[in-house]
Image: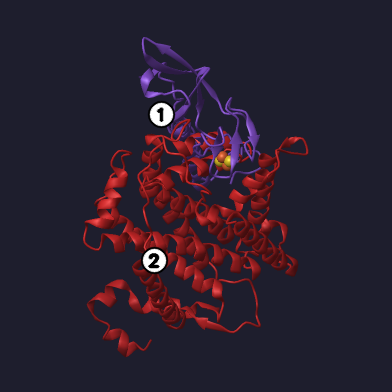
Chain colours: A purple, B red
Amino acid sequence: MGSNDEPEEVPRRDFLGMAVGGSAAAFAVAGGYPFLRFVDPPAQQPSGPVNIGKLEEFPVGSARTVVVDERPVLVIRTGDGFRAFSALCTHLQCVVAYSAERNQIECPCHRGIYSMDGRNIGGPPPRPLQELSVTVNTGSVIVSAV
Amino acid sequence: MSAARDDSGGWLRERLGWAPLTAALAAYRIPRGNIAFYLGGTTLFLLLVQVASGIMLTLYYKPDAAQAFRSVERITGEIEYGNLVHSFHVWSSDLFIACLFAHLFFVLVRRGFRAPHELSWLTGLMGLVLGVGLAFTGDILPWSQRAYTDARVGSEFAKYVPLVGTWLNRFLRGGDEVTSNTLVHAYGFHVAALPAALTLVVALHIFLLTRRSTPVPEEASRETIPLYPDFFVRQAAALTAVLVVIMTLAIFFERPLGIAADPRLSSPGGAMPPWYFLAIHQILRAAPTELLGIDGARFLVSAACLLGLLVAALPFIDRRGSKATAVLAWVLLFVLILLAASALN
Ligand code: FES
């Protein structure tokens, strides 16, 4: 240690400790940011309109679940035309199904109920089903996110 | 150990430094009949059992959405003793979580978190979080219809965690949705990231125990036994019994795979998450739409997270380890069991 009129010296051991600690912190920051960015998965881009089959495969009064962008989509054909909804229940994401008997959409997990226009009308679901648009083009049924 | 025996210890003992090692273990004393220690040893044993059986399963498992289910079906149906190894792995995973939880619970009611054991308590809780992560990611791997539903519902739980929920949800799914990426993610976590992290945490947990002259806060009245050989022999007897239990479960109570995941199929009716998520599942199922002006589920899960943080901070809040903490721990356990039981209805 220096005397009163000399600047106080940092002991060698403390200096080395600070240098190692400082370098470790610098490496942690320099490596941590790219690490966090890397493990954060990129947003999934919708693939655009998807052809889900021929018109005759969807008789009036029927419903079918198809897979669009690896997600289940419930396509219902009524006398008025087509409706398509994400088949993922807005409660805890179970896959819903159409009940022809009760003419409603039901979630089997906790008995959630949706009306035919996707509104949550019973059970725990807090929101309506997400709707997708359906068009028919030269005999093919096309589904795309709204 | 006598000097004469040390001399006759042989080549290997000499190289292992056996005599000083056993002397140090014999000098380390733990309270007689403290169930928390036996549960800790059993948890560690179950972890090792899972690592061994898990490595065997990786020889045939294919972490690909198109092939995963078939590969597990092959393990259980075509590979010799595959059914046993698979069932053994799954049952030991359930027992691992149960023992880990029970270990921490008994440490809590015996107030073993008191100074200077704060870090042991925190590493124990970290072990529980990582252990549940291991079990959950393993649950997804068969990519059966049930696994697919569990992946959906389980990752949806994460969304309600305050501050990091959305990030956690996407992170668990490997994207915005449960897709084939989710399976690859779960596989990476199950066989690499989580076991590595858990090994570090367990090593730190044990290291911290060895840093203390006694592994429990001062309780002079307690009778103690040496770690070696007394505790080791008793623990070995307990582990033999545990092994018999797992083998019995694995042989007589197979874990059916169900059917392959198909996103077009509606979820199975009354779908239940793995048992360790039943309480939180019930909270989310029964949550009112709104509580005090905010989303009911978010409110209740935030409250549960806050409770979790309080439990983690116990050594700093209840420094002396009051009896009230032990009583509250029993109450909390009772509430959890009640919630889980009502989830089954
Ligand atoms: S997930 Fe559909 S009602 Fe709960």
Q: Identity of the amino acid at label 2?
A: Phe
Could you classify mark 1 by the number of other residues whose Cα lies within 10 Å: few (under 14), some (14-19), or many (20 or more)?
many
Image quarter (top left, top right, bottom left or bottom right) of the N terminus of chain B: bottom left
Q: Identity of the amino acid at label 1?
A: Val
Residue B159, position as x, y percentages in the image = 57, 38
Query: In the picture, residue B254 is in which quadrant?
Result: bottom left
Query: In the picture, residue A105 is in which quadrant?
Result: top right
Rendering quadrant holding ligand 1: top right
Q: Residue at x 45, y 81 (%)?
A: B234
Q: Residue at x 41, y 63 (%)?
A: B92
**Label 2 lies in what chain?**
B
**Residue B326, disc:** none
Q: Is residue B316 left or right of residue B265?
A: right
Q: Is residue B239 left or right of residue B314?
A: left
Q: Is residue B217 above or below residue B89?
A: below
Q: B130 and A132: which one is in front?
A: A132
Q: CA distance from mark 1 to mark 2?
A: 36 Å
* Callouts 1 and 2 in the same chain: no
Q: Which residue is mark 2?
A: B253
Image quarter (top left, top right, bottom left or bottom right) of the C terminus of chain B: bottom right
- The residue sitting at the top extreme is A138
